[in-house]
Image: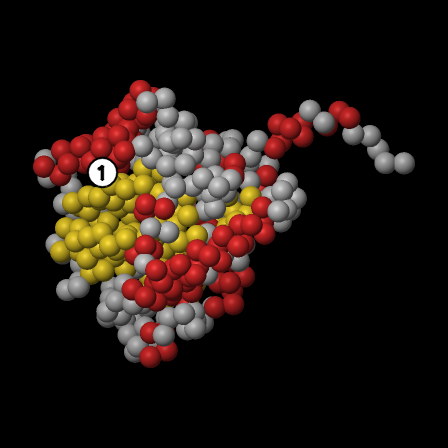
Amino acid sequence: MKVTFSIIKADVGGWPGHATVHPELIKVAEQNLSKAKKQGELIDFHVTHCGDDLELIMTHTKGEDNEKIHGLAWDTFKKATKKAKELKLYGAGQDLLSDAFSGNIRGMGPGAAEMEFTEREGEPVIAFMMDKTEPGAFNLPIFRTFADPFNTAGLVIDPSMHNGFVFEIWDIQRHMSIKMESPEELYDILALIGAKSRFVIKRVYPKKGKLPEDEPVAVISTEKLFHIAGKYVGKDDPVAIVRAQSGLPALGEVLNPYGFPHLVSGWMRGSHNGPLMPVGVKNAVCTRFDGPPRVIALGFQLAKGKLVGPVDLFADTGFDRARDIALEITDYMRMHGPFEPHRLPLEEMEYTTLPSVLKKLHERFTEMK
């Protein structure tokens, strides 16, 4: 059976500020998706949040980029925005960059990761959701999951994974893509994805194993809001879908990279580098300097498209040490105040509100003598 697993998210109002999502917004979304499920548009759904982003997790049989599914998500966000405005929540509807739905949610503000695949006998799927960061934040953990033998033992000892994987990488500045094979092109892959603000992993495919080679095993949202809106309207807060087990990295191999709270771009006003902290859903509330950046992971087993779960995977005490390290890094980075490398370099700051500050100083500059 082919099933489509969709995560579509948007910031439609923060409570308070950019901290979290008000329960009334989640209630509105659940009611709207429940109605769609009864009408047969969805197999199943789950609504959650990461920071101030409303997250819609849906399963269906309509494939990727389906107008009805995207229209359903858009309608849900519009209704949630209406409630957000009633409650006077901060930035109500900020990710909805148009008044009218045009058939596809991509390019309209919300982020989306979707994956159509043949459901296996046992199908574990992990939904990752981040807040206060950019799509490139997934580059390091996804690479380690599917290409690093020091993280993923299956690359060495599992014959079905020994041939490696294919990485689809997007150049989000030039709007171009390339497919590269691991381990053959390992160093070339790293040469690209190390520049995480420009090159991002979009999909990972299996290679010469027991899984169909044209069906992805990992998908990451890659929307860049400043490319869409032409100005700073918030960080992209990416989401990802990763399948596990039976010819793929085991659940623990998928989760282990997040035990290292690596530095990502975003945080306060989308303008600072900070550690990515793995947390359970109840702790996905961004407060300290509007952060630090968070990532949650919800695990499901699929049963003919039905979502058996979720399991709040980062709520495990096994990630306590990662959280401690993240908080130590937070202290260290915050002590830099407005100085780089805590604040992003100027070429990235041009997509924030800083240019408006610099513009008023432009006329006061004179030639050096």
Identify which residue is drawn at 59% across, 52% down. 332
Q: Position of residue 75 (x, y in %)?
A: 25, 29
Q: Quadrant of the N terminus?
A: bottom left
Against 151, residue 53 (above or below) is above
Q: Residue drawn at (26%, 30%), measured in percent from left and top?
A: 24
Indicate the position of residue 151 as horizontal and vertical percent values: 41, 70
What residue sits right under mark 1 in the picture?
Answer: 69
Q: Compared with residue 363, is residue 335 higher up or lower down, i.e. above or below?
A: below
Residue 263 lies, in percent from the top left, at 52, 53
Compared with 307, 36 (above or below) is above
Q: Is residue 232 left or right of residue 69?
A: right
Which image quadrant for residue 205? bottom left
The disc labelled 1 sits on which kind of residue?
Answer: Ile
Task: Describe residue 165's horizontal placement relative to residue 228 as left or right.
Answer: left
Outermost residue, top side: 86
Q: Can residue 269 be seen by looking at this rendering?
A: yes
In the image, 280 versus 263, the foreground residue is 280
Q: Is residue 181 above or below residue 295?
A: below
Q: Quadrant of residue 111?
A: top left
Residue count near mark 1 (Cα–Cα under 10 Å), binned few <14, some 14–19, many ≥20: many
Q: Position of residue 137 (x, y in %)?
A: 46, 52
Q: Residue at x 48, y 41 (%)?
A: 288
